[in-house]
Structure formats: C-alpha cells, structure tokens
Amino acid sequence: MQELPSEKKRKRLIKVSVETDPYHGKHPKKRTVSELIQNSIIVLDKPSGPTAHQVDSWVRKIFSIEKVGHAGTLDPKVTGILPLGIGQSTKSLSVLSQAGKEYVGLMKLHKTVSQKKVEAVFKQFTGSITQLPPVRSAVKRVKRKREIYYLQLLEQKENEVLFKVGCEAGTYVRTLCVDIGKKLGVGAHMAELRRTKVGRFTEQDLVNLHDVKDAYIFYNEGNPDELKNVLLPVERVFEFLPKIILRDSAIDAVCHGATLAVPGVVEVDTDISKNDVVALFSLKKEIVAIGKSLMSTEEIIDQDTGVCVNPEKVFMKKKTYPSIWKKH
C-alpha cells in the first residue's frame, strides 16, 4: 500500500474519563467567521504562473489582513496544494515541514526507453536518496539525503512518463527527474508537476482563488456559509501528528511554558515513542502546543507521575483556560 508516513492510522487510548468545562475554550467548529479570519487555513489550488508569494499577496488583499503565509513553496509553473496560513495560523505552518508530500508529474526522456527499464530505475530511487539542490533554490547547494516513500509509473507513451511520487518535504522533484534520466543513460527533464498531498491535506480540500474571493464577497453580503467552507480550523495542520489530550486544569500551565506531567493527560494516541513530536490538544479538540514526548504511549498510560512532554511551541493564547496551577 502506497502512503505517506503522515497517513499512518493511530488508535486513541483513554487514560482517565473527565469532562471539559463548557465555559472555557471553544470547539473549532463553533468558531465564528471573524475568529476564523484571524486564525485559519486555506488549502489553495495554486494555478500555473504566479509565485507562491504573489498568491499570498492576493489573499492578503482579499481579506485586508496583514498576515498570510504559505507552507512549502511551489515553483511558478507547478500547480496543486498550497496550504495558506491566515492571521495567527501562519506560525503553525512550519509543522508541515515534518509531513510527507505527494506529486503527480510528467517527465520527458530525451530518448525513448522501455517501460520495464524505467520501472527498474524507479525502484532504485525509492528509499533514501542523495540530492544536490538546483542552482536556483532557496537552500544552500550541498548534497543532502531525502526519503522517497514511493515512486510509481502511472503511464508511459514513447518518451513521456507520467509518474506519482511520495516524498519527504524538501525533495526536489525536478532534480529527481534529471537524476533518473542520468541513470537511464538518456537524459530527462520534468515537463509538468502537480502537488496532490501535503500531510493529511488532499485535493478534496482544495479551493481556488475565485472561490476565496467569491466566498468573502458573500460573507460581506451576509452569507457566511461559503467562507466557513473555505477557512479551515488551524487544527487541520496538526492532524498527521500523534496526539495527547489534556485535562482543562493542565492547559494554562502548558501555555505558560510548563512541561506536561502525566496527571495532566486524559487520552493518548498509540505508537508514540520517546522523542517523537506530539501535538497537545484540549478535550474540545483545540490545539494547545506541540512538543517532544519524553515517554512512550505505554509509559504515559501506565505511570501516575513524571514529566511526559516538553512543549516546544505553544499555539493557544494564555488564560483561554483558568490558571489552576501555582507558580513557584
């Protein structure tokens, strides 16, 4: 089965059954449009032509808002999924650098070779590969390792090869095509490319720039429904991470930078190992923070004391939940 590591399915284990206070916090689905405009995600279908930064600028103008950013820059001619952070959610986008990505591309071989030979070389480029970023790139031009999770030949017509690749963030698919061409001994280049997945975001989540503009116009005319479909809760960014659910009384301490102790945990996902990046959520499904797990799932479930997560980045505002903890 071909899937990205970010698509791994986990089960939720309940450590203790508690209820959440209805007077503090808010389920993401209950947020107003004005709240979403300050903190949400748009999964944009980037058209061919503009740069990712130009797209940011256009969306900024539509909403008359200062903060709009994107995750994972796409070249001007590349189309597909471009996650945009609106307002405060821009600081959450860096998390997606840990999520896998999928592309469908068209590679042109400089001479025709058999499909059997192309498939054999594709197998050689599956797994850990070494790449030298192209001359025009945003990173230092040194060799670096990247993981290719799957590389599938979808269709071949003479020297045109349609393929699908699942890869680690920061993989240059254009360079991948050139390297495959060299291995085949005939040369090759990337003719077209479309990004079809980023973490748990898929093409089913996509909206285009016209959808965004029309939805905002409808909102200003008194109909917010379309805009609610366009603006996704920021929590969607963290779907691919293993989760630990906190009791209300532990949340504000974490928001102030405290480590998470085991008594603050009410639920935990399976398959968490020590040093994994985990997402800390409230019982109302709000993102609180992300951090490094200091215990495995089994240890969190079995132990009654000890520190289990060291928070590294907090996303919830302080005092969203009451301060029951004491400062020392």
Image: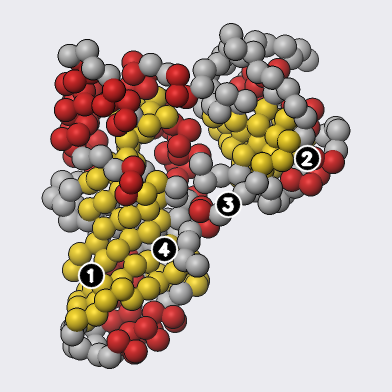
Q: How far is mark 1 from mark 2, CA to CA?
A: 47 Å
x%, y% of residue 80?
26, 51
Q: How far is mark 1 from mark 4, CA to CA?
A: 15 Å
| Residue receiving disc 3 | 9
First in residue order: circle 2 vs circle 3: 3
| Residue receiving disc 4 | 166
Mark 3 residue type: Lys
Closer to the observer: label 1 or label 3?
A: 3
| Residue receiving disc 1 | 106
x%, y% of residue 35?
38, 17
The C terminus lies in quadrant: top right
Dot 4 crowding, Cα within 10 Å, few <14, some 14–19, many 20+:
many
Q: How far is mark 2 from mark 4, CA to CA?
A: 32 Å
Pointer 1 with pointer 4, Cβ within 8 A: no
Task: Report helix, strand or loop for mark 2.
Answer: helix
Q: Which mark is residue 300?
A: 2
Compared to residue 203, the image places residue 249 above or below, namely above
First in residue order: circle 1 vs circle 2: 1
Mark 2 residue type: Ile
Compared to residue 171, the image places residue 24 above or below, namely above
- Residue 66 visible from this viewpoint: no
Mark 4 residue type: Gly
Mark 1 residue type: Leu
From the viewer's perspective, tell me whether residue 162 is left or right of residue 234.
Answer: left
Pointer 2 with pointer 3, Cβ within 8 A: no
First in residue order: circle 1 vs circle 3: 3
Q: How far is mark 1 from mark 3, CA to CA?
A: 30 Å
